[in-house]
Image (cartoon, helix red, strand yellow):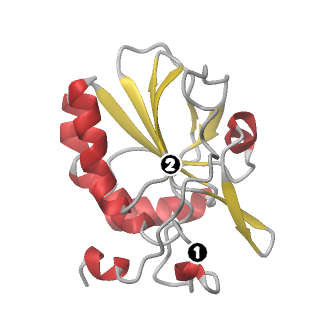
Amino acid sequence: MEYSDLLKDIQVPEDDGGCNHLANLILPEISLPNQDGNDLRLNRTDTFRIILYFFPMTGRPDRSLPIDWNLIPGAKGCTSQTCSFRDKYDEIISLNSVPIGVSTQSIEDLKEMTTRLSVPFDILSDADLKLKNLLNLPTFSIKEKIYIKRLTLVIEKNLIKKVFYPIFPPENHINELIEWLKTN
């Protein structure tokens, strides 16, 4: 099955203003566990940009999606988005940037996904909602489970330089991001 087939009938998210406060914010001191359970510090003064892209959840072949998942605007398309970052990884690196994904999924789920999809970069778990709460990120919930809405932050020396939100369609966002990186 092609990833584009997964995106049929995708619901378009609207800009609810949930990220208006993020531009030019300093990233707080925080570390989150990656797919291997190792903490990765996000507030850094490295010379490269961090591309922090948030996605609600990537499904697993051995589990059903939450009920009505595909009817929630902005929920569907996480796998295709992550695959687009994977496929453009070398180009992102060549632009002095490092992609890092973030989801509220468990480390176990992220490990399964990164292995299955051959993702060459870190995907972090914000299952405890630490980063979500520190940055007051937009969310939605299903049966008490909180999911971060799809957004991307370009961070340079701890400063959020660019916010992409809402993101639609998710598989094409990578092109918009790369174009921005080339011109800024």
Q: Which residue is mark 1?
A: 72
The quarter holding residue 117 reads bottom left
Q: Which residue is mark 2?
A: 151
Residue 154 x %, y %: 43, 31
Please name the residue shown 37% across and 44% down the image: 121
- Above or below — where is 82 with respect to 181? below
Please name the residue shown 62% across and 39% down the image: 32
The quarter holding residue 34 reads top right
Residue 49 x %, y %: 38, 25
Q: Which label sits on residue 96?
A: none
Q: Earlier in the sequence, mark 1 or mark 2?
A: 1
Q: In what element is the residue under mark 1?
A: loop
The quarter holding residue 84 reads bottom left
Residue 76 x %, y %: 47, 72
Mark 2: amino acid: Leu
Mark 1: amino acid: Ile
